[in-house]
């Protein structure tokens, strides 16, 4: 699909134009960028700074304060390894993100081919590439593209009965993002269901995907040995500024409700909150056709992949990006788009337009996810 290559280029260009239009502060080390460094300025906002801090200075943890332990090590270690050969940290972040995003689309496309014909497979790939928050996959200094590449590849390996490799890729995925319950549940259920569909008895190797949780376990062991708190990545979420302690207050979205009751929200803040909440609702609704149309293991994975951030977020902010991890939903969306022409006529221009607009806004420093 050569035409698909234009999507990452357009999103990077939109982010660069957003930076030039809004003139936000340039990232540290790019205060006076050369012309070829300008795209990096629009791609390196918000969490990209935390990943740079980890890549350069490693982890530190101050209980009660925002600390880099909130971010899993897979992405910053990849950035550090690449910068060791001479690239700047910012260039390394952009390159890892961009290459992994392209690889994730290819892995997703190959995975989808196990369930649908070529036309639906290509529709699903376009649906993922043009998803309004997909710009996070194309050069933005976040871990989403690396995680998506690893988790898509892990499920692909299960479908191709390469279970040791699936376990390894799953472990690397849980080393990148706090998604171990979803990844372990999804990969294990997929392996077991695949044997059941084939009418074959279970083998000991069918349980290998359970080892995919070792990536998260390794990070927790490090946190315990270094800071005395294996769950520091979760505890730090309650720090001022993040204000997302684990518990009913967060799970029941009391802050989300109070934000609207207060009447102090600006219109753009209201739109941002409602937008992320709407995506969360749409993702939950897509679980039903996913359960009916795809192997049920994928509905279980998606349920966990979207359920964890829904429960852990005080106001749904970030869900637009987190939903990318539930990649089978985009295949379900493609099946619906193929059946409903009116939906296609609305979805494609709306999704593509929002993708470019949000990339432009992010480049200008707007907090979107």
Image: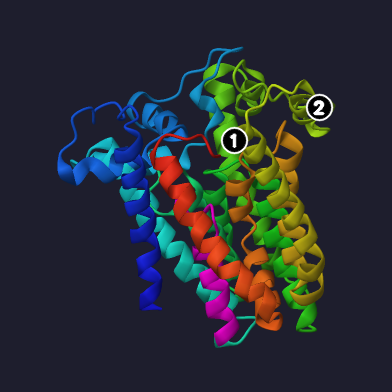
Is 249 part of what is drawn in magenta? no
- At 80% from the left and 29% from the top, the residue drawn is 257
Answer with left or right where residue 67 lies relative to residue 311. Answer: left
Q: Earlier in the sequence, mark 1 or mark 2?
A: 2
Pick the residue in front: 346 or 87: 346
Q: Residue at x 76, y 52 (%)?
A: 281
- Please rate how many residues cluster around mark 2, counting C-alpha atoms within 10 Å: few if below 14, some from 14 to 19, many from 20: few
Circles 1 and 2, Cβ within 8 Å, touching? The answer is: no
Q: Can you give x and y, in whole percent of width and height, for residue 187 in the image?
A: 67, 61
Q: Is residue 124 visible?
A: yes
Identify the element where label 1 is drawn: helix
Q: Position of residue 153 (x, y in %)?
A: 52, 64
- Using the image, determine if residue 117 lies above or below residue 151: below
**Can you say which quadrant of the picture contains the C terminus?**
top right
- How many angstroms separate mark 1 from mark 2 (CA)? 20 Å
Residue stretch in magenta: 119-136
Could you say which is closer to the camera, residue 58 or residue 356? 356
120 shown above or below 287 = below
Between 237 and 72, which is closer to the camera in this rendering?
237
Say what secondary structure mark 2 lies in.
helix
Estimate the x, y position of residue 130 in percent, counting from the top left.
51, 63
Q: Is residue 123 magenta?
A: yes
Residue 38 percent across, percent down from the top left? 24, 42
Mark 1 crowdedness (10 Å alpha carbons): few <14, some 14-19, many ≥20: few
| Residue in the image at 72% along x and 35% along y | 312
Q: Which residue is mark 2?
A: 254
Which residue is labeled 1 in the image?
A: 268
- What secondary structure is the stretch in magenta mostly built from? helix
């Amino acid at each position: 699909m050569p035409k698909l290559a234009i999507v990452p280029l357009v999103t990077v260009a939109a982010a660069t134009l957003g930076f030039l239009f809004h003139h936000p502060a340039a990232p540290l080390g790019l205060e006076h960028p050369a012309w070829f460094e300008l795209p990096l300025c629009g791609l390196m906002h918000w969490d990209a700074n935390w990943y740079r801090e980890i890549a350069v200075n490693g982890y530190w943890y101050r209980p009660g304060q925002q600390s880099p332990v909130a971010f899993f090590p897979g992405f910053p270690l990849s950035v550090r390894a690449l910068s060791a050969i001479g690239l700047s940290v910012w260039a390394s972040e952009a390159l890892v993100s961009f290459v992994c995003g392209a690889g994730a689309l290819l892995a997703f496309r190959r995975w989808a081919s196990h369930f649908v014909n070529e036309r639906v497979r290509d529709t699903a790939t376009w649906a993922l590439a043009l998803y309004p928050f997909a710009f996070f996959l194309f050069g933005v200094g976040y871990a989403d593209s690396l995680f998506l590449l690893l988790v898509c590849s892990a499920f692909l390996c299960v479908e191709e009965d390469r279970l040791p490799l699936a376990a390894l890729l799953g472990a690397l995925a849980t080393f990148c993002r706090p998604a171990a319950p979803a990844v372990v549940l999804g990969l294990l259920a997929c392996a077991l269901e695949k044997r059941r569909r084939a009418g074959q008895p279970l083998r000991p190797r069918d349980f290998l995907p359970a080892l995919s949780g070792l990536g998260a376990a390794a990070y927790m062991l490090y946190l315990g040995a270094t800071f005395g708190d294996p769950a520091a990545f979760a505890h730090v979420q309650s720090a001022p500024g993040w204000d997302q302690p684990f518990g009913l207050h967060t799970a029941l979205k009391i802050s989300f409700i109070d934000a609207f009751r207060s009447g102090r929200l600006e219109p753009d803040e209201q739109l941002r909150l409602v937008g992320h909440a709407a995506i969360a609702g749409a993702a939950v609704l897509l679980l039903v056709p996913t359960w009916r149309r795809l192997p049920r293991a994928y509905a279980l994975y998606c349920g966990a992949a979207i359920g964890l951030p829904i429960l852990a977020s005080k106001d749904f902010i970030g869900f637009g990006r987190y939903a990318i991890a539930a990649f089978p939903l985009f295949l379900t969306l493609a099946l619906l788009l193929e059946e409903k022409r009116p939906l296609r006529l609305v979805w494609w221009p709306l999704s593509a337009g929002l993708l470019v607009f949000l990339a432009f806004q992010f480049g200008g420093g707007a907090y979107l996810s």
